Amino acid sequence: MAKTKRKKTIKVGITPNTFSYLFKRLRRQEEEYEFSELSELRRVLSNEKAKILYTIKYEKPESIYKLAKLLNRDFKSVSQDLKILEKFGFIEFRKIQKGRHKLKPVLLIDSLNIIFEV
């Protein structure tokens, strides 16, 4: 049986002073986010977060700590980035009980489409 592709679409509406986008959550919820500056949108779609998503997909780290080690970044920074990615529906955390309680980051999407609407 073929694996179902999980996509996320972000629509970015461009107005004279504002960026805004709609995107549909995997759980069929719709949320609207308003961005007053490009820097706010870049906060969600930064190079660091792209590296995190790539590493989660291909390395499948078993914890936030292991992910931070794979990325050669400090735990706190990676944890903050993961919280943003979770808020916007890119990842979720699964609880793992092996000795100590761990949170395993799991990718929720297979592809990301960004559409700029003028």
Image (tube, helix red, strand yellow):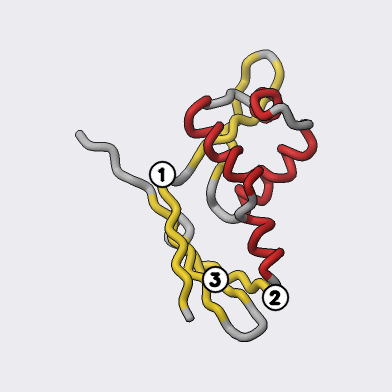
**The disc labelled 3 sits on which kind of residue?**
Tyr
On the image, which quarter does residue 27 sit in?
Answer: bottom left
For the residues labelled 1 and 2, the Cα–Cα distance comes to 28 Å
Residue displayed at 39% across by 52% down: 7
Residue at which label 2 appears: 36
Residue that lies at the very extreme toward the left in this rendered image: 1
**Secondary structure at numbered mark 2:** loop
For the residues labelled 2 and 3, the Cα–Cα distance comes to 11 Å
**The disc labelled 2 sits on which kind of residue?**
Ser
Residue 82 picture location, percent across and down: 66, 43
**The disc labelled 1 sits on which kind of residue?**
Asp
Residue displayed at 49% across by 33% down: 57
Residue that lies at the very extreme toward the bottom in this rendered image: 16
**Secondary structure at numbered mark 3:** strand
Nearest the viewer among 104 and 43 is 43
Residue 11 picture location, percent across and down: 48, 69
Residue at which label 3 appears: 21
82 shown above or below 55: below
For the residues labelled 3 and 1, the Cα–Cα distance comes to 20 Å
Nearest the viewer among 61 and 112 is 112
Residues at badges 2 and 3 in contact (C-beta under 8 Å)?
no
Residue at which label 1 appears: 110
10 Å neighbourhood of mark 1: few (<14), some, or many (≥20)? few
Residue displayed at 59% across by 39% down: 51
- Which disc is residue 45 wearing? none
